Amino acid sequence: MIFVSSSNFNTNGGRVPGGGLGCLLLAIFGFAAVYFVLKGLYIILYWLSPVLLVLAAIINWRVFPQTVKNWLKGLQTNPVVALIYLGFSVLLFPFFSLYMLLKAVGLKQLERMGAQAFGQQGSNSPEQEEFAEFEEIETIPKTDLKPKQPVTPPELPEKETPPAKSQEPPKPQNPYDQIFDQ
């Protein structure tokens, strides 16, 4: 049996120092850092959540009924998922209030972009628009559209009957037949 030691090679080969234990410690420290960052963000948003909700209501109050309507629709179609969403929105209320503010800002921006896309600039109010000239077309009631005489369909030409098939149709000549006949 031949034993090859890896100590002959002094390169790490892209490995993490410490091997598997180093990866485990790095993952633990990473999760701890993420936990403390999210905990601090939760505390900050907890104190700001009433302000965020009021700002969301000022920017676009329609997000609140829309969110409730979406939740009720979800309750009808998939009640388990809707209840889980409700539980998360209660437990993570500060993040939910931030979500409502971002949704209100996003919908307001979407309305602005839609108004610009359809040519309704802020300076052009409906009162200032000029009306385009038009020509009034005479309308005819449906009862007058009925014809006075019954319309007969046009006569179609009669089809010629094909001749009786008493003979076998001639076979087309194949140029390759001459090669094999020789």
Image (spheres, rainbow, N blue to C red):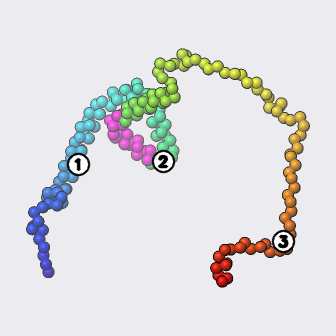
Kindly identify which numbered label has been placed on residue 114. Answer: none
Q: Determine whether the residue tagged by mark 2 lies in a helix, strand or loop.
A: loop
The residue singled out by tag 2 in the image is 78
Amino acid type assigned to the residue bearing label 3 in the image: Lys
Residue at point 19%, 56% (across, down): 23
Residue marked by disc 1: 31
Q: Which residue is mark 3?
A: 165
Q: Secondary structure at mark 1?
A: helix
Secondary element at tag 3: loop
* Circle nearer the viewer, 1 or 3: 3
Instruction: Check disc 2 and give the amino acid type.
Output: Asn
Left/right placement of residue 103 relative to residue 37 reads right
The stretch in magenta equals 81-98
Q: Quadrant of the C terminus?
A: bottom right
Predominant SS of the magenta segment: helix
Q: Earlier in the sequence, mark 2 or mark 3?
A: 2
Toward the viewer: 80 or 99? 99
| Mark positioned earlier in the residue sequence (1 or 3) | 1
Q: Earlier in the sequence, mark 2 or mark 1?
A: 1
Seen at 11% across and 65% down, the residue is 9
- Residue at (37, 29) in percent of width and height: 53
Judged by depth in the image, the label closer to the viewer, 2 or 1, is 1
Q: Nearer the viewer, residue 156 or 47?
A: 156
Q: Quadrant of residue 46?
A: top left
The mark closer to the camera, 2 or 3, is 3
